[in-house]
Amino acid sequence: MKQTFQACIALLLVPLSSQALEPIAAFAPNVRILFQGDSITDGKRGRNQDPNHILGHGYVFIIAARHGAAFPERKLDFVNRGVSGNTVLNLQTRWQTDTLELKPDILSILIGVNDSGRGVPFDQYEQVYDKIITEAKTANPMLKLVLCEPFLKPKEKVNEDIIKRQEIVARLAEKHGAALVRLQPVFDEAAKRAPPDYWVWDNVHPTYRGHQLMADEWERVVRDFWK
């Protein structure tokens, strides 16, 4: 009886995050997980070492907080280098300093909605995206890659430009052996439970509720891809 009581007390002392969360196999000890992209990834992240803001206030923060709290012994290093307004062309110009020199073990990229808005040609979008991925894999042949499809607020009329860019990202994911996070279906399904504005406050940027959906789907895909 005493041992059972002590076991119960010990369980209560373990953080709830650790009790409820299974570790992701790709999150090995001491790995660096780098998130790249535009404003959705940026999440108004801080540009100094303030730990309360350095990861921004979106899906990156949620993923890092959840796994950092659950598995402190793994010493996971989450890094956010998303920059608001970026296209894949902007990403290319800062790729050396903001990606290659950071030497990630896991690299997650979400880029494309600004390319759509600014009319970056599809062939250029794909060629440049393919090039920077290849450079990252050359720098680290063991790199684990996560590609997230761009998305928009659910609407009755679909955006053909975004659909084509989603297809490009899916094609690149297959080519490079990357985990593919399809976010449009997540938001489309969520819009059946609550109005689109509940999840995406303008045409592009998720609310905190939408960022939670993104974090959950990102984790689900990464967990299943590297078992």
Image: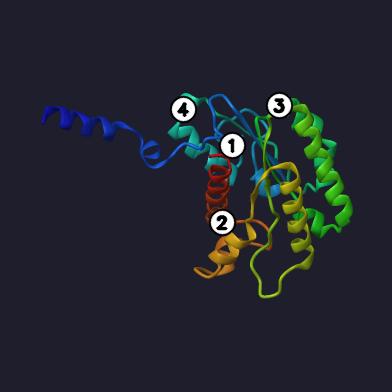
Inspect the image, locate mark 3, and give the three-letter code of the amino acid beneath it.
Lys
Of callouts 3 and 2, which one flags the residue occurring earlier in the amino acid sequence?
A: 3
Inspect the image, locate mark 1, and give the three-letter code of the amino acid beneath it.
His
Q: Are marks 3 and 4 in contact (CB under 8 Å)?
A: no
Q: CA distance from mark 3 to mark 2?
A: 29 Å
Please say if 167 is above or below 107: below
Q: Can you identify the residue that label 4 sits on?
A: 72
Q: Secondary structure at mark 3?
A: loop
Q: Nearer the viewer, mark 3 or mark 2?
A: 3
* Left or right of residue 28, residue 11 in this image: left
Q: CA distance from mark 1 to mark 2?
A: 19 Å
Q: Nearer the viewer, mark 3 or mark 1?
A: 3
Q: Residue 93 in the image: state x and y as whole percent.
A: 85, 37
Q: Can you identify the residue that label 2 sits on?
A: 210
Q: Can you identify the residue that label 3 sits on?
A: 103
Q: Kindly identify the residue that appears in the image at 75 percent across and 68 percent down.
A: 159
Q: Residue 202 in the image: state x and y as whole percent.
A: 66, 62
Q: Secondary structure at mark 2?
A: helix
Q: Can you identify the residue that label 1 sits on?
A: 53
* Left or right of residue 66, residue 145 in this image: right
Q: Quadrant of residue 144?
A: top right
Of callouts 1 and 2, which one flags the residue occurring earlier in the amino acid sequence?
A: 1
Of callouts 1 and 4, which one flags the residue occurring earlier in the amino acid sequence?
A: 1
Q: Are marks 3 and 2 in contact (CB under 8 Å)?
A: no
Q: Nearer the viewer, mark 4 or mark 2?
A: 4
